[in-house]
Amino acid sequence: MSAGAPLQLTIELGERSYPIMIGEGLLDDAALLARHVTARDVLVVTNSTVGPLYADRLCRGLAGKRVRTVTLPDGEQYKSQAVLGQVFDALVEARLNRDGCVVALGGGVVGDMAGFAAACYQRGIEFVQVPTTLLAQVDSAVGGKTGINHPGGKNLIGAFHQPRAVLADLATLRTLPARELRAGLAEVIKYGLVDDAGFLGWIEHNLDRLLALDMDALAHAVRRSCEIKARIVAADEREHGQRALLNLGHTFGHAIETAEGYGEWLHGEAVAVGMLLAADLSQRLGWLQPAEVERVRTLLRRAGLPLDAPRIGAGRALQLMGMDKKVLQGRIRLVLLRRVGAGFVTSEYPAEALQATLLHHFGAPA
Amino acid sequence: MSAGAPLQLTIELGERSYPIMIGEGLLDDAALLARHVTARDVLVVTNSTVGPLYADRLCRGLAGKRVRTVTLPDGEQYKSQAVLGQVFDALVEARLNRDGCVVALGGGVVGDMAGFAAACYQRGIEFVQVPTTLLAQVDSAVGGKTGINHPGGKNLIGAFHQPRAVLADLATLRTLPARELRAGLAEVIKYGLVDDAGFLGWIEHNLDRLLALDMDALAHAVRRSCEIKARIVAADEREHGQRALLNLGHTFGHAIETAEGYGEWLHGEAVAVGMLLAADLSQRLGWLQPAEVERVRTLLRRAGLPLDAPRIGAGRALQLMGMDKKVLQGRIRLVLLRRVGAGFVTSEYPAEALQATLLHHFGAPA
């Protein structure tokens, strides 16, 4: 693709519809920024890793506006009520009013927190996502889920608040640590597993290009991931139904993240292991063949993702899964695989099968 | 009215429509509670003043459900991020899931915080308002505004989140301190001033009955206030336009509350003084006659409400008003009175007139 011509997708949500722009060099493209950030007063929310690399360029691109910046500490452990309070303080100090705009410059943590702050400040102001990690570009920056963690569970406190635009600058992936790139690939693989076997085959075929930061391959991966997410979010914004498909591996993964302490595992790493558990359970229930589970495992291994859950014990894992948001009426809803490329959501499975999967991966209760 | 037959109004908001029930003895009416609190898992949020009086009765009325209670400290100064965190902790500890329900038992502070916690917990669960102050019954429990204060401004952090029902038990007003009853009357008077001159006349005629806790008079005041609010909220849920009328006196009042420290002034007291300032400015702009301003002052005095703003200085007041949510593009929007019974929202007024009102009431800048 040409660096001068970003791709555009649209999340169709009626009057809350918004564009996803995918390309290289977007974050200091003044004309593009002026189209998507229309407010006069702007607060840029970033973190101590991304800010020094890109905040000045973004702020220069926003020339002519009154722009302030707040820099948060970097890491999932800072997606907390205390750090959220820092964003509120910065909004008040910048004297943003209802017509101001928050711009999130960073990965999933920055985007989730900045978006949640925008959702709550003055009961809701605009925000624009400028995701700088693969995970944020393919998943967390798109779809309006915002929030923070609670010591009792991931993302337990939050809001649905759609951004005005998502500006995914692929060039920022060149400064992304390899571990974070691999964590983002877990979510890319997720889209193939739950929705598109053809895309999964493409990922298998192009994995080395993706790992080598081939921009054309990355552009295709981000675009196809966002296309799938856009379709599903447009049909079920508030996750009453099929949007839950996008949580493949997440209920298991959240238990890992909560048990191990936020920040020890990257979100995508926990999701990778969680997807393996979902595949394992799908096999126990007769949906997947052993060779299909092996195919999932092989792809995750090639992507450099972890395959082994921490040995926290099946009981503790089940307890932490019970605090996940996908529990209704005391039953844990799970995303399973009917086959590769076709996920489904269910709470109809024998408890013994889940227990066997948990015992196998998390170990016996202590 | 008969104690056995509550009045019912409806807030018409499509699929988010909900009833307001007004009557005596509602809070332990098991059949009524069962109709409006359908969840199996309930967290009752109350405070240290109201809880000892009514929480046990409410919990008995909710028999058959899994009910937990969290008791917050009493006072506007506790409508804070820290105390909100206590509600989140209680929700996690009670292991409420998406299908749980928060019940707010108390005044405006409890309702605003419990509602905001319900809005954010798991990105939104149900809540039911059981308001026990006049202010909450006529205003804050109705309409879905929830939130907390920030040291920089009142209600700066919050969400629109409509309750499933509002159950206004008039009998609880018998234990309300006289000062709080008077503060609630300020909001009742507000409805007359901005929307219904006939109702204002009724209030003037029945003020002594209201102050003496005559249940028929209170029922009429709560009902008429809620009718007006219901109509305005149904037409403009998110305050893009006419809902701002309900903020008569609030921009001035918020400046007083913020300057004096939350909890020193009751909200209704600050609104009373704020309404006088709005009347003063409306007179300076040629809308109100001096006799009409005097009529407002006389009614507020008879209701036992404060008439004098604290001498914080016009400059500080203007600065604090600038942090109010009703500021757009740097202009302070105000609710003024075209005549008694007819408010309007405007940012078109000479700055000098506002300055004269502020100087007169808040004193010269220090």
Image (cartoon, coloured by chain):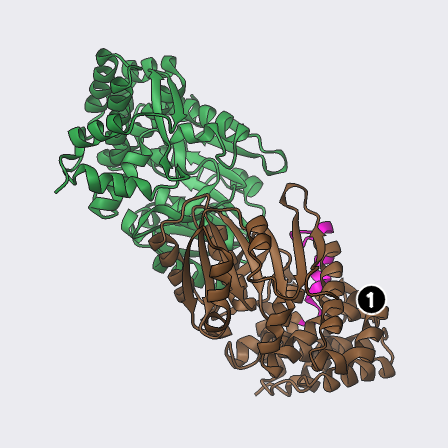
Chain colours: A green, B brown
Q: How many marks?
A: 1
In terms of secondary structure, where does tag 1 sit?
A: loop
Q: Which residue is mark 1?
A: B196
Quarter of the C terminus of chain B within the rendering: bottom right
Q: Is residue B212 above or below residue A167?
A: below
Of residues A326 and A256, the one nearer the viewer is A326
Q: Position of residue A305 (x, y in %)?
A: 21, 29
Of residues B63 and A263, the one nearer the viewer is B63
Return the chain for callout 1.
B
Residue A207 in the magenta stretch? The answer is no
- The quarter holding residue B229 reads bottom right
Q: Position of residue B338 (x, y in %)?
A: 84, 69
Q: Which residues are magenta?
A: B234-249
Residue B239 in the magenta stretch? The answer is yes
Kind of residue at disc 1: Asp
Q: Residue at x 36, y 33 (%)?
A: A171
Quarter of the N terminus of chain B within the rendering: bottom right
Q: Position of residue A289 (x, y in %)?
A: 25, 12
In the picture, measured across the screen, residue A204 lies left or right of residue A104, that is left
Asked if residue B364 can be seen in this view, the reply is: yes
Asked if residue A59 can be seen in this view, the reply is: no
In the picture, measured across the screen, residue A67 lies left or right of residue B335, that is left
Of residues B276 and A72, the one nearer the viewer is B276
- The quarter holding residue A341 reads top left
Other-residue count near label 1 (Cα within 10 Å), few / some / many at <14 / 14–19 / ≥20: many
Of residues A224 and B238, the one nearer the viewer is B238
